Image (cartoon, rainbow, N blue to C red):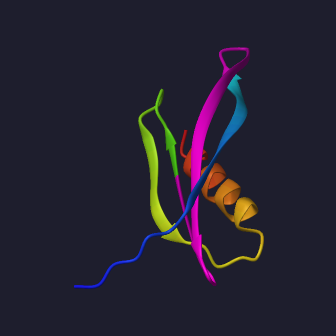
Amino acid sequence: MEGAFFPIESNLFKVDKTRKFGTGTMTETWFWEISYASKGTEYYGMAIERNKNERISWTELKEHEYGNEMVNLIKSKMDIY
């Protein structure tokens, strides 16, 4: 068995999601904790929204702008709500 340690950096991504509610709208605030791990040319990301009990498991990131890739994954996850 082989293993490797990857340094991790973390960020908080705050998202206000507005949706229809009755005859008006309602805004919910989501707080995503995003963690990035990288070593050489390997990049991974994961995110947790603890209040909503949502998670994006560790996934390999392919885009050069890995922050944007994580934001797109989060937006896709939130679109189901």
**Image position, residue 27 (x, y; %):** 70, 21
Q: Which image quadrant for residue 28? A: top right
Q: Which of 7 and 64 is in front in this view?
A: 7
Q: Which image quadrant for residue 23? A: top right
Residue at the far left in the pictured view: 1
53 falls in the magenta region: no
Identified at 56% across, 53% down, the residue is 35
Task: Answer left or right for 7 relative to 55.
Answer: right
Q: Which image quadrant for residue 65? A: bottom right
Identified at 61% across, 58% down, the residue is 73
Q: Which of 2 and 60 is in front in this view?
A: 2
Give the magenta range. Answer: 21-46
**Image position, residue 6 (x, y; %):** 50, 68
Identified at 40% across, 77% down, the residue is 4
**Image position, residue 50 (x, y; %):** 46, 32
Q: In which quarter of the image is the C terminus?
A: top right
Residue at the far top in the pictured view: 23
**Image position, residue 21 (x, y; %):** 65, 19
Q: Which of 52 and 57 is in front in this view?
A: 57
Q: Is the magenta stretch mostly helix, strand or loop?
A: strand
Q: Which of 11 and 48 is in front in this view?
A: 11
Q: In which quarter of the image is the N terminus?
A: bottom left
Question: Is 13 placed above or below 38 here?
Answer: above
